[in-house]
Structures are given as C-alpha cells and as structure tokens.
Image (cartoon, rainbow, N blue to C red):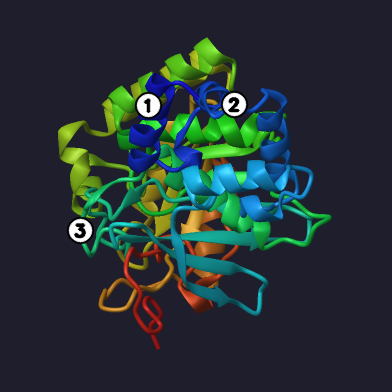
Amino acid sequence: MNSDNRKFLEQSCLERKFLEYLPADLSAILTGLGLPQFRLNQIRRWIFARKTMSFDKMTDLSKETRKILTEQFGSVLQGRESAHHQSDDSTEKLLIEWSDGERVECVLLRDNRNHRTACISTQVGCAMGCVFCASGRDGFVRNLSRGEILEQFLRLNSLLPDHERLTHVVVMGIGEPLLNLDALLSALNEATASEGLDLSVRRVTISTVGIPSGIRKLAESVVRNGKGYKLAVSLHAPNDELRTQIIPQNRFSGIDEILKASDDYFEQTGRRVTFEYTLIAGLNDQPEHIQQLVRLLKNRTAIINIIPLNPVLGLNFQTPSAKTVAWFAGQLELKGIQVKVRFRKGDKIGAACGQLRRVHRTNPTITD
C-alpha cells in the first residue's frame, strides 16, 4: 500500500464506520488495502443476505483479510443495542445507542399476511412538536447519518429467522424524514438494492408532517432515480387553526401548500399519497371535521389512514372508542373517500405510532 492510500485510509476510517461508505468508496478503500474488487461483493453478501455483522465470521474470506477489515473498521455496526422489548403481538422494539451517547428507537412489526415491516427513525429527537407524540418531547438533537439509518435495517432484519427477511419499510419512527432526506435516501438505496436487502421500492413509505419543499425534493429524486417510494402526509386536522394546535410546524406552510405539494408528488411520480389522521377523542373527531376532510380530499386521488390515538404518559389526550373510529371512517367512506384504519400493534411496549422516544424509561409511554 502506498503512503497516499495509507494516509487516506487512516483518516477516513477514523472519521467514519463501514456502513457510512457508499459502495464505490468501499471499492476504492479495498483497492487501497490491496484486496481484489470481488471481496466487496462477498462482504456485502455476508452483511445483507447472511445477516453477519462481524468480519471475523465471514469465513470465505482469508484470516488475513478478516484481520485487515477488523483493524480498519472494527465491526460492521457502530451502535450498541441498549434495550430490546418484545410484545405479545410479536412486535419488537430496539433502543440503539450511538457512539456519542445519543439514542433512538426502531421497531419490527409482524402481521398475519407475512409482512415483516421495519419502522425506522431518521433523527435523534424531533423538532416538529406534534402535541400527541412522544418522539419530540425530549427535544431535537441531530440528524442520523446514512450508516446509522442503515444499521436500523440490519438490526431489525437480524431479529428474523434465517429464512425470513424484511418485506416493508415505514419511515415513521423518530424525526422528520424530509429534514434529513439525503441521508435517508442514501440508506434506502442500499436497502432496496438487489445486492443489498433487496426490498421493493414500492413497499417503502416515507411519512412527513408536511414540508412542501421536502415533498418536492423527494418527488424530484423519485423521478430522477426511478425509485417510486410511497408518501404519507400526517394531516391530523382538516383546518389550519386546529392543525397548528396539533402540529405547530403547520404555521410555516398551511394545509393548502401541503396539499399542493402532495398533488405535485402524485402528478410527477404516479404514486397515490396517503394522508394520516390520528383520531383524538373530542379534538378532531367531530361531524364538522368529517365535512372539512371531505372538502379537502374528495377531488384528490388519495387514501386517508385513520390512526386511533396511542396513549403517551404525561399527555391528557384520549383514545376514541372503537365505535367512534368506525363511525368516523364509515362517514368518510359514504362521502366517497377511500379509508383505511390502522390496527394497533406494539402499544404495550411503547412501540406504536406516536410512542417512540430517544431515551429509555421504564414503561416509557404507556398509560394506565
């Protein structure tokens, strides 16, 4: 190895871990280490297909190669599993601690349709301040890196038996994805690559509170790269006054601008937008709210996803009754709006929508 390559490697590997590098960068690094190019494909197969996160266990590499990789990168993973919770509905939640001591949660969801869904976080904390959500209660700290996002995929995939793999992704964990879009899209490129986790791009949903500029940036990326990710917009209210009360971020844009950006997304990508609506008893579940929602959505090719509020410790908002949820959804359907009601999973371990946090507490989000 010449002195220039050695200097580059020493500087790079001190700054970043293995998952932070793009494949092209890794190829250059392996060349600098004197390793043949086909080694990268071997390493990637071990990581993505065989769920192996230790170079020492990659047995079709020579002992010398494994030693070199371990010396340069340490381990494939850069975080530490700080807590692992399992629910009786087969949901699993991980709390991951990064090298700077910050933490995030991510979730594995299973259902009876053989879906194995990863719910991924994109930021440490959240600045959006949605009043019913636990994720922003401890404040915003920083964006996650490409490698930290990708690591969540790998850890959740490793919870599955060898014959199973992740089938779906929802970017609905901690943070606002469109405010960390470059890192997210880089991680998703690996997750959806055929030599990566080989996830279908059509089974990836990115959820946002509604950042018009971010929605348009995502649309441009989808058109440019041909990766048609689904977009879900957290609406939660049918008028600006109520929405700003629930989502303070709304004061910077307003519903009209968010809907225009969502229309543009559909026109440019051909992917129908889902509007998420967390139903909160006595707040946004009244007959006038149904009428306002119909006026907003009746001429749009969209789906509204009704999410009965999941309880969060310390917040006084109430979950609506099953009867109210059914009535609300039924009234929208009668008006010609396509509706789905999200089934609750993982709420007993604080893993349901709106319950994830960046810090660990005993029973962190469950109310009595």
**How many angstroms separate mark 2 from mark 3 (CA)?**
45 Å
Q: Label 1 sits on what residue type?
A: Phe
Q: Label 2 sits on what residue type?
A: Gly
Which of labels 2 and 3 is toward the front? 2
Q: Residue at x 72, y 26 (%)?
A: 38
Tag of residue 139: 3
Q: Kindly give the residue lying farthest to the front in the view shown.
A: 2
The first of marks 2 and 1 along the sequence is 1
* Residue 268, horizontal then vertical, whole percent: 50, 13
The first of marks 2 and 3 along the sequence is 2
* Other residues around mark 3 within 10 Å, as few (<14) / some (14–19) / many (≥20): some
Task: Give the quadrant of residue 354.
Answer: bottom left
When the figure is inspected, residue 161 is found, relative to residue 23, above or below; the finding is below
* Residue 147, horizontal then vertical, whole percent: 45, 42
Left or right, 98 with respect to 40, comes to left
Q: Residue at x 62, y 54 (%)?
A: 54
Tag of residue 34: 2
Residue toward you, 289 or 320: 320
Q: Residue at x 37, y 26 (%)?
A: 8
* Residue 123, horizontal then vertical, whole percent: 33, 48
Tag of residue 80: none
